[in-house]
Amino acid sequence: MNKPLLHLYITGLTPRSERAIANLRRICEDELGGRYEMVIIDVLERPQLAEDERIIVTPTLIKSMPPPLRRVIGDLSETEKVLSGLGLHPPAGLQNQERIA
């Protein structure tokens, strides 16, 4: 599996932004085992990046790699919905099962 590249767009260090950052870090560590790259972009400091990605609501999380590109909006508090929305959830039937090679 390629390492997911995640861009989290926030607007300043508001409570909602801080919650999204904490939730994303928890999800990445717990579910991806630390195999990810994360970039946090404050749209107040980098408005052109937000415009280029057509960000109209924050927090917005974009998974750009591996394809396809996926977006999730909100504070990322619902782990299953975040993983499913990003296409990072294991296929049905493979959760909580050991793989034998």
Image: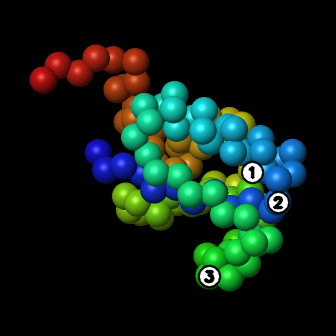
Sequence-first tag of 2 and 1: 2
Q: Position of residue 96 (x, y in %)?
A: 40, 18
> Could you say whether the residue bearing mark 2 is in a helix, strand or loop?
loop
Q: Is residue 81 visible?
A: no
Sequence-first tag of 1 and 3: 3
Please, what is the three-letter code of the amino acid marked with disc 3?
A: Asp
Q: Position of residue 69 (x, y in %)?
A: 47, 64
Q: Residue at x 79, y 50 (%)?
A: 17
The Cα–Cα distance between marks 3 and 2, rounded to whole angstroms, is: 18 Å
87 displayed left or right of 56: left
Query: Which quadrant: the N terminus?
Result: top left
97 displayed left or right of 73: left
Q: Name the one closer to the observer, 44 or 7.
A: 44
State the mark number for residue 49.
Answer: none
Residue beneath label 2, please? 12
Query: Which numbered mark, 1 or 3, is in the foreground of this view?
Result: 3
38 displayed left or right of 50: left
> Could you say whether the residue bearing mark 1 is in a helix, strand or loop?
loop
Q: Name the one closer to the observer, 16 or 68.
A: 16
Task: Residue lying at the far left in this picture: please name it.
Answer: 101
Residue beneath label 1, please? 74
The Cα–Cα distance between marks 1 and 3, rounded to whole angstroms, is: 20 Å
Sequence-first tag of 3 and 2: 2
Query: Which numbered mark, 3 or 2, is in the foreground of this view?
Result: 2
Please, what is the three-letter code of the amino acid marked with disc 1?
A: Gly
Q: Position of residue 37 (x, y in %)?
A: 46, 51
Query: Which numbered mark, 2 or 1, is in the foreground of this view?
Result: 2
Crowding near the residue tagged with mark 1, few <14, some 14–19, many ≥20 C-alpha atoms within 10 Å = some
Residue beneath label 3, please? 52
